[in-house]
Image (tube, rainbow, N blue to C red):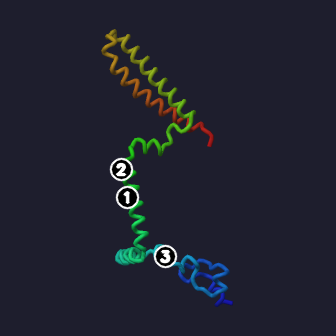
Amino acid sequence: MAATANHTRCTACRRPLPFADWTTGRPLCQSCSRPLGALVREIQAPPRTPAEEAAAYERILDTMPDALMDELIAALEAEAQKLDQANPVAGVLAELDIGRTPRERRWAAWGFAAGFALNIAIAKWAQVASAAPISEFLAPMIVGGLVAGTTCAAIGWGLARLRSPA
């Protein structure tokens, strides 16, 4: 009975053998008996020293078919080219999922409008209180309004994200 229990697992990866493999007396599971099974076993059991690691890497590269290597290189080059062409701002916006729902866009728009209007009101109050001409306050009013509006739009978007159903 003990000898039978020892053979119920693959001798390479120690996974349980399926009943069909076990009854035929095969010592390896189906994934280990394939040509890439050795590659999988090599990856699953990492070497201990840097020299062994380098040798194992060389063995993996030697056992990998050239067609598979060419396909992997082509896929990596295509991905690198796609990343080079991508706009960094668009990548950040896509990662944050900004403006995916109408609710988020609406809250961000109202946040921008409120921030811009509040900045204009404060700048107008400062202009009236100092009795300075409007021409001195026009550029700071617009630039400050854009900054305040963008900040409040981000706050509005964040609030919409917090309140959105999961």
Q: Amino acid at mark 1?
A: Glu
Check disc 3 and report its element: helix, strand or loop.
Answer: loop
Q: Quadrant of residue 62?
A: bottom left
Q: Which quadrant holds the N terminus?
A: bottom right
Q: Residue at the spot x=62%, y=78% of the render?
A: 16
Q: Name the spot of residue 136 as percent of width and height, x first.
A: 30, 15
Q: Residue at x 46, y 21 (%)?
A: 118
Mark 2 lies on residue: 84
Image height check: is 59 above or below 164? below
Q: Secondary structure at mark 1?
A: helix
Label 1 environment density (alpha carbons within 10 Å; few <14, some 14–19, many ≥20): few
Name the residue type under label 3: Leu
Say which quadrant the C terminus sits in: top right
Left or right: where 155 falls relative to 51: right
- Left or right: where does residue 160 sit relative to residue 63? right
- Residue 8 appears in the picture as rendered: yes
The relative height of residue 131 versus residue 11 in the rendered view (above or below) is above
Q: Which mark is residue 36?
A: 3
